[in-house]
């Protein structure tokens, strides 16, 4: 298994286990760490907002993003929202998982941290799953942004606990358009 850990800082912790029998930790040969701050000594120093991620398509089985996605883009900007999730989808192999945590929308840290740029909640995930998107469009207040999103994830898990919203998405390739 090859794992990309985004915004890792100095941590290499696995916060989300997809299966109960999954090991608690990664081995060093499985994990590639990425952070914009070189003083954390990541494997790759890169600003996720500077352009396409510096990895080949279909190169990871798993992308983990703990408390990083809320620092990207801008609230109300669907182009950067789909750009960020699109890059995760691009580097994941078919069936690969995006595992993430973000501050819960009701947490004081969702907007209390001056470096947070967006809130991601259960509703945000609907836009990323083509069948769910089609089911909701026209029956809810969601915007029709399908002209911006040509990728596809299944929503495997979404859980609100304490101050955090954790979710697991599975890359569907080819997308169900």
Image (tube, rainbow, N blue to C red):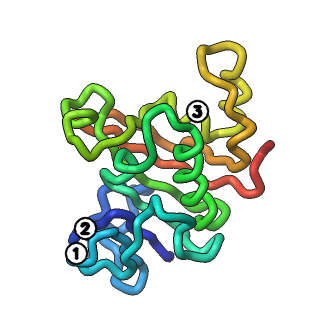
Residue 100 visible in the displayed image: yes
The residue lying furthest to the right in this view is: 177
Dot 1 and dot 2 residues touching (CB under 8 Å): yes
At 53% from the left and 75% from the top, the residue drawn is 54
Residue 162 visible in the displayed image: no
Q: Is mark 2 on a helix, strand or loop?
A: loop
In three-dimensional space, the C-alpha distance between marks 1 and 3, rounded to whole angstroms, equals 34 Å
Q: Where is residue 128 in the image (x, y as percent from the top left)?
A: 61, 41
Q: Foreground: 101 or 22?
A: 101
Name the image quarter holding the C terminus: top right
Q: Where is residue 4 in the image (x, y as percent from the top left)?
A: 44, 70
Task: Residue under label 3, please give it.
Answer: 126
Q: Which mark is residue 9?
A: 2
Q: Position of residue 19 (x, y in %)?
A: 43, 56
Location of residue 45 (image quadrant):
bottom left
Residue 158 versus residue 6 in the image, above or below: above
The residue lying furthest to the front in this view is: 50
């Amino acid at each position: 298994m090859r794992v990309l850990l985004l915004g890792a800082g100095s941590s290499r912790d696995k916060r989300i286990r997809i299966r109960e029998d999954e090991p608690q930790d990664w081995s060093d040969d499985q994990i590639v760490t990425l952070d914009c701050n070189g003083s954390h000594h990541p494997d790759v120093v890169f600003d996720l907002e500077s352009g396409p991620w510096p990895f080949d398509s279909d190169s990871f089985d798993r992308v983990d993003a703990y408390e990083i996605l809320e620092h990207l883009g801008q609230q109300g900007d669907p182009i950067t929202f789909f750009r960020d999730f699109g890059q995760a989808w691009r580097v994941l192999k078919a069936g690969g998982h995006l595992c993430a945590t973000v501050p819960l929308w009701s947490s004081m840290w969702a907007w209390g941290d001056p470096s947070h740029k967006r809130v991601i909640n259960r509703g945000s995930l609907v836009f990323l799953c083509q069948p769910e998107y089609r089911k909701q469009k026209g029956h809810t207040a969601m915007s029709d942004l399908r002209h911006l999103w040509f990728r596809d994830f299944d929503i495997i898990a979404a859980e609100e606990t304490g101050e955090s919203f954790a979710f697991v998405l599975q890359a569907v390739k080819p997308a169900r358009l």
